[in-house]
Amino acid sequence: MLERLEATERQIAELEIEKISAADLPNESNWIAEYDRGFLIRPTNQNRHPFELRINGRMQFRHTGFSRDVTSWTDNAGVTRPVTNENYFEIERGRLEFRGFFLDPNLQFFLNIDGDTDDSHTAIFQDFWVNYEFSRAFDLYFGKAFVPGSRDWLNGSTRTRFVARSMATSFFRPDRTIGIWADGEPVERLYYRVMVGNGFNTTDLTPSEIDTHFVYSGSMWFDLGDYGQGYSDLEWHCEPAAQIGHSFTTACQSGRDAAGLPLAEENFVRLSDGTRLTELGALAPSVTVDHFDIYLYTIDAAFKYRGFSANGEYFARWLEAIEGNGALPLNQLYDHGFYFEVGYFLLPESIEVNGRISQVFGAFGDSEEYSVGFNWFINSTHNCKISFDATKLNHCPVSASGENLRAGDDGLLFRTQLQAAF
């Protein structure tokens, strides 16, 4: 009898040991998978296992139509290019986003994988970073992200008022780069972001395609009242709310590749008529520009009140110390422009009508964009939204696939988009 009791006690002790050991293992019994602003995976005891992963997805399914007013355009280098009509469906942004923390709740990560059907149907690392949040006033990042040189650019593509950003934003803004940056809220409702990176526009470029100069960029903005996210007054502010800010970016662009051509990093800049600055003959016959310094300064403001909203940004760009492989008639250029948008909810949190004007001014010609459109917020958020706009373009000076813009386009552009996100 005593032997049986001792055996039973040993079995109970062994079972308790197994339970304790099992509790230490990150198996399915002590992990939680649920939906919380995305598909969330986390341990039940985050103090013991500091980790969290949230997965989000987004798709912009779009129809684009363009009816031309001209059949061709000739750039400042004397090259004539056709202007064609368009009518097609596309997936503009098919994205998976992974974010969370590891080892420490303040040690965070973000990964954005993006695929576009108008970009060879490839998937790329659009954004990828690791950051440590030291405080509300200082969050330090390492990776790939936006160069913060324009508010409209920095605000992202999820909450744009129209199907896409304005023509002026597309012409002046920087792009993504790899670098180091910091942001924060040093005092209540005052925000900043500063960055040092590889270049003004080095997204998807390799080290052999970029020069040895960094880009330096910063943005600061202030909220007057509880402005919130996005330009549309989805929240239906009962008290006026506004946001004001400005941004500055500078970079030196210089160098040639092994074939003797300007580095790919320099190819983003266009003259105000749409000619690439580095195109042969852009500024003088048989001369190719291979060096310039760029300075971009922007001022922005936005407003919301009882379903009405307005926002805009002014852009000023200086190109200095322009040089090439021959004599040039000028060594500096100044271009400027703006966009201004307004919107109003006919049905609160549901149906919004919008209008926009956008212009670019420069030594080689001026351009104009006039748009009207509407948004239907199906579930009162940007996560399920149908948008439509009709845009009149008068000599578009920029090519941007995300906006369905092509340099030299004159005509009427129609875009219809379903945005679905989880």
Image: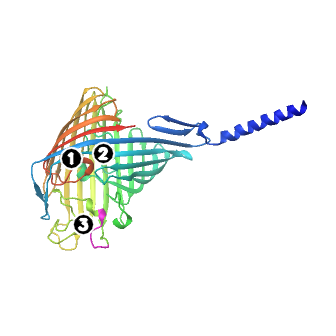
Q: Nearer the viewer, residue 2 or 152?
A: 2
Q: Earlier in the sequence, mark 2 or mark 3?
A: 2
Q: Residue furthest left?
A: 70
Q: Is residue 390 left or right of residue 419?
A: left
- Please say whether residue 143 is one of the residues in the magenta stretch: no
Residue 8 in the image: above or below residue 211? above
Q: CA distance from mark 2 to mark 1?
A: 28 Å
Q: Quadrant of the N terminus?
A: top right
Disc 2 secondary structure class: strand
Q: CA distance from mark 3 to mark 1?
A: 25 Å
Q: Which mark is residue 321?
A: 3
Amino acid type at image mark 3: Ala
User: What range of the chain is rendered magenta?
Assistant: 258-265
Q: Which mark is residue 338?
A: 1
Q: Which mark is residue 91?
A: 2
Q: Is residue 250 left or right of residue 64?
A: right
Q: In front of the other: label 3 or label 1?
A: 1
Amino acid type at image mark 1: Phe
Q: Residue furthest right?
A: 2
Badge 3 local density, few (<14 within 10 Å), some, or many (20+)?
A: few
Residue 177 point in image, percent of width and height: 37, 56
Residue depicted at x 21% and y 47%: 338
Q: Is residue 68 left or right of residue 94?
A: left
Q: Nearer the viewer, residue 197 or 224?
A: 197
Residue 170 in the image: above or below residue 3? below
Amino acid type at image mark 2: Ile
Residue depicted at x 37% and y 38%: 421
Q: Earlier in the sequence, mark 3 or mark 1?
A: 3
Look at the numbered discs 2 and 3 and tell me whether their residues touch, using CB distance below 8 Å: no
